[in-house]
């Protein structure tokens, strides 16, 4: 890296050597004392030459002498620069000794400015960055990739764009600046990269190679609070702004009020001061001088320089509005100290700065931030709970809507089931009627069998049997058709398992099932009787067997029995159909119970939804109540503040009245002295009296007694006192004082039993009573009464 030209401030900084304190002079060697003496002598010569040059600049006759003095000044300057180099070279070589024994002298020399060619090594020594382990890692860090590379590349062109070292897209300065910023973003991944830090690194690169600049920057971030400033939260920057606002309010209250009236916040102009250490605000030579002091004293110099700048420009800033102040900060203030940075440093160290107070402000700021953090956590928790409650309400609303849909669907389904149940009841009635008809036909057949048993078989009987056989076959066909229809209906009923009878008809159906079972038993019994009758008929008298139509009768009987057997089978199948109907009815009952349970669950969910809504309303009511209580507490606090202010105003008014009385008494005293209305003794007595009155009034001002029971005397009491004192009744008096007794009669008794004294002047009567403790059981205060003659 090429060595840059020194700034103009380095020569100005060494023009005056600091005056060593007695303690520092004892620690200096003879050579150093001799060197300091030479520096002081050269300074005196330079000051004399500069004065002579200023005094002789307007005269053309002494132009030759001015040239001689200027040449002598340049020679003295060269000698002084050589002595300065010798002094700083000795400081660098004996650094540890100077830091231990000559710290105050070193501080003064740094405030005067470090020579340009010594800045690199002195900054490293001040930051203890000469031998750091991270220096050996620098080359390895450059080989790694950083997530902040794009941001660093974007901001490099904005860092010192007018400086020769950083001018140009692919210049050496931009490349080494990128390397240092990338390496630090890998070392400290929490901070990463911040734009303001590039200006600090750029200033370091102007003075030293990139590896040394990297070490110094790491030390600055770790030991000089810069890391806290550049963290993403920027908590340290908020603390610095808070402290600076306090200093501004304390030392420049008028300017602070003007800033607030114009909404010109401190962060609008002071943030860059702390983030870039004035490197983006002031010219580079002036900012470098401030950076010298910062390396030794820390952020204190930033507070001092900022307040010094505001003090210097207070008159101009108060007359400007917000936009004008912004322009003034950007264009006027940065160039006010170009020619004389020492003037700014001198003003900075005239600013009042209390480190203890700054520590206290830091604690206050930490407490405020902790409270804000707790409030934010509480607000975030409440918002989360509110969001969860809203989600729960939405879920319950969806469930409620789904339950309402299910309820409506259930009602529709039950209406359909009721309609289908009605149709099934009608079909069941038809089946019962058919069953009754079949039972009647069975009974008729049984009657016919009985008749056949009692009579002989004739041709007419055979024809009747044939007719009955045909009718039985017809009935069999009808029963088969009815049976098929019933089977189809049963299949249809099995498909429609949702057809359920009402719970009220369940007992009726059970009774009908019992009756059908009884009928079934009766049918079986009749069937057995019919079989027995058939066997009896088959085993009748011999004349039947001997009949020529025996075979035909047997066939007819067989056919009749076959028809009756088929009829019995049809009835059995009918009973099976009825049993299936009963099973379907039991399934209907089970389904109805399931529907009842669903209704109960739906009602329970509705109750739960109502309960949640009530809880939400209760929470909202509690929130409103808390808001109302907070508003009431705010109103009470305001009322208390107003009451305190009113009491203060009343006390101030009372004090003003007493002071006015004191002034009137003093005026009367002066009039008595000047006009000489009284003789010498009367004047002295009057003066003493006025002094006593002034002292008493001052005591009343200092020690007001708000709990005393003072009241003014009435006209009657004044006239009575005048009689007691033997005063002239024709002269009207009025009372302007107060007495501290509760009752007028007590005052009279005190007067009668105590010791009294009377003082008479041309303007007032002073009556003083001291009570007698022997005749009264309690001690009372001394009573003073003043009666004034009206003017």
Image (cartoon, rainbow, N blue to C red):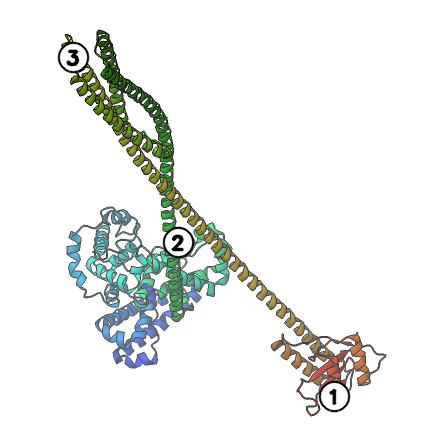
- Horizontal side of 294 relative to 353 (left or right) equals left
Q: Residue furthest right?
A: 730
Question: Could you tell me if the residues under marks 2 and 1 are in contact, i.e. CB atoms within 8 Å?
Answer: no
Question: Residue 336, image x and y in percent?
Answer: 41, 58
Front position in the image: 311 or 518: 518
Question: Could you tell me if the residues under marks 2 and 3 are in contact, i.e. CB atoms within 8 Å?
Answer: no
Q: Nearer the viewer, mark 2 or mark 3?
A: 3
Find the distance from the CA under tag 2 to the CA under tag 1. Answer: 75 Å
* Disc sitting over residue 379 in the figure: 2
Specify which label sits upstream in the sequence, 2 or 3: 2
Question: Residue 251, image x and y in percent?
Answer: 46, 65
Front position in the image: 763 or 408: 408
Residue beneath the point at 75% across and 84% down? 748
Q: Nearer the viewer, mark 1 or mark 3?
A: 3
Q: Which residue is mark 1?
A: 757
Specify which label sits upstream in the sequence, 1 or 3: 3
Quadrant of res 780 = bottom right
């Amino acid at each position: 890296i090429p060595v840059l030209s020194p700034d103009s401030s380095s020569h100005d900084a060494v023009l005056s050597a600091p005056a060593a304190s007695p303690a520092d002079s004892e620690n200096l060697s003879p050579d150093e004392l001799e060197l300091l003496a030479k520096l002081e002598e050269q300074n005196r010569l330079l000051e004399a030459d500069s004065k002579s040059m200023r005094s002789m600049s307007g005269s053309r006759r002494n132009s030759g002498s001015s040239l001689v003095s200027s040449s002598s000044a340049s020679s003295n300057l060269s000698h002084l620069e050589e002595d300065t180099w010798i002094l700083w070279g000795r400081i660098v070589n004996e650094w540890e000794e100077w830091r231990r024994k000559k710290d105050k002298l070193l501080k003064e020399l740094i405030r005067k400015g470090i020579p340009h060619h010594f800045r690199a090594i002195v900054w490293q020594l001040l930051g203890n960055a000469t031998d750091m382990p991270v220096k050996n890692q620098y080359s390895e860090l450059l080989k790694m990739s950083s997530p902040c590379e794009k941001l660093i590349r974007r901001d490099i062109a904005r860092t010192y764009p007018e400086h020769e070292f950083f001018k140009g897209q692919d210049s050496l300065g931009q490349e080494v600046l990128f390397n240092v910023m990338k390496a630090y973003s890998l070392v400290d991944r929490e901070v990463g990269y911040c734009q303001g830090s590039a200006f600090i690194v750029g200033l370091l690169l102007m003075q030293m190679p990139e590896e040394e600049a990297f070490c110094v920057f790491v030390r600055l971030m770790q030991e000089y609070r810069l890391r806290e400033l550049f963290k993403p939260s920027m908590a340290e920057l908020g603390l610095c702004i808070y402290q600076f606002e306090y200093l501004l309010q304390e030392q420049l209250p008028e300017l602070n009020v003007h800033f607030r009236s114009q909404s010109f916040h401190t962060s609008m102009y002071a943030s860059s001061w702390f983030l870039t250490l004035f490197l983006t605000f002031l010219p580079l030579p002036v900012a470098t001088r401030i950076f010298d002091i910062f390396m030794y004293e820390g952020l204190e110099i930033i507070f001092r320089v900022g307040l010094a700048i505001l003090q210097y420009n207070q008159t101009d800033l108060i007359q400007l509005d917000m936009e004008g102040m912004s322009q003034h900060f950007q264009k006027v203030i940065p160039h006010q100290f170009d020619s004389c940075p020492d003037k700014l440093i001198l003003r900075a160290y005239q600013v009042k700065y209390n480190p203890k107070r700054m520590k206290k402000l830091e604690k206050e700021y930490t407490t405020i931030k902790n409270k804000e953090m707790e409030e934010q956590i509480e607000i975030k928790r409440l918002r989360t709970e509110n969001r969860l409650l809203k989600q729960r309400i939405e879920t319950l609303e969806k469930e409620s809507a789904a339950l309402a849909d299910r309820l409506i669907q259930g009602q529709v389904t039950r209406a359909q089931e009721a309609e289908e149940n009605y149709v099934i009841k009608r079909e069941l009635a038809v089946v019962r009627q058919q069953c009754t008809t079949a039972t009647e036909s069975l009974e008729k057949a049984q009657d016919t069998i009985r008749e056949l048993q009692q009579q002989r078989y004739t041709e007419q009987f055979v024809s009747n049997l044939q007719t009955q056989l045909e009718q039985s076959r017809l009935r069999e066909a009808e029963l088969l058709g009815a049976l098929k229809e019933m089977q189809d209906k049963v299949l249809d009923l099995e498909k429609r398992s949702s057809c359920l009878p009402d719970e009220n008809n369940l007992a009726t159906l059970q009774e009908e099932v019992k009756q059908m079972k009884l009928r079934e038993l009766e049918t079986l019994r009749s069937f057995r009787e019919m079989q027995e009758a058939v066997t009896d008929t088959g085993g009748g008298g011999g004349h039947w067997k001997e009949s020529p139509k025996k075979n035909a009768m047997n066939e007819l009987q067989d056919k009749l029995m076959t028809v009756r057997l088929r009829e019995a089978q049809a009835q059995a199948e009918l009973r099976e159909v009825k049993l299936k109907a009963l099973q379907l009815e039991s399934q209907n009952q089970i389904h109805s119970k399931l529907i009842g349970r669903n209704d109960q669950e739906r009602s329970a969910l509705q109750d739960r939804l109502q309960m949640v809504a009530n809880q939400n309303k209760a929470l909202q009511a509690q929130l409103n109540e808390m808001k109302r209580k907070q508003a009431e507490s705010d109103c009470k606090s305001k009322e208390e503040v107003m009451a305190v202010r009113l009491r203060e105003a009343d006390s101030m008014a009372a004090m003003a009245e007493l002071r006015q009385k004191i002034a009137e008494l003093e005026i009367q005293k002066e009039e008595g002295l000047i006009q000489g209305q009284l003789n010498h003794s009367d004047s002295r007595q009057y003066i003493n009296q006025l002094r006593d009155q002034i002292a008493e009034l001052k005591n009343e001002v200092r020690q007001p007694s708000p709990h005393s029971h003072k009241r003014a005397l009435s006209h009657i009491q004044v006239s009575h006192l005048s009689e007691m004192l033997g005063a002239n009744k024709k002269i009207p008096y009025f009372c302007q004082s107060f007495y501290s007794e509760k009752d007028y009669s007590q005052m009279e008794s005190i007067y009668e039993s105590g010791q009294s004294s009377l003082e008479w002047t041309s303007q007032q009567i002073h009556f003083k009573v001291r009570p007698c403790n022997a005749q009264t059981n309690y001690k009372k205060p001394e009573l003073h009464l003043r009666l004034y003659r009206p003017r």
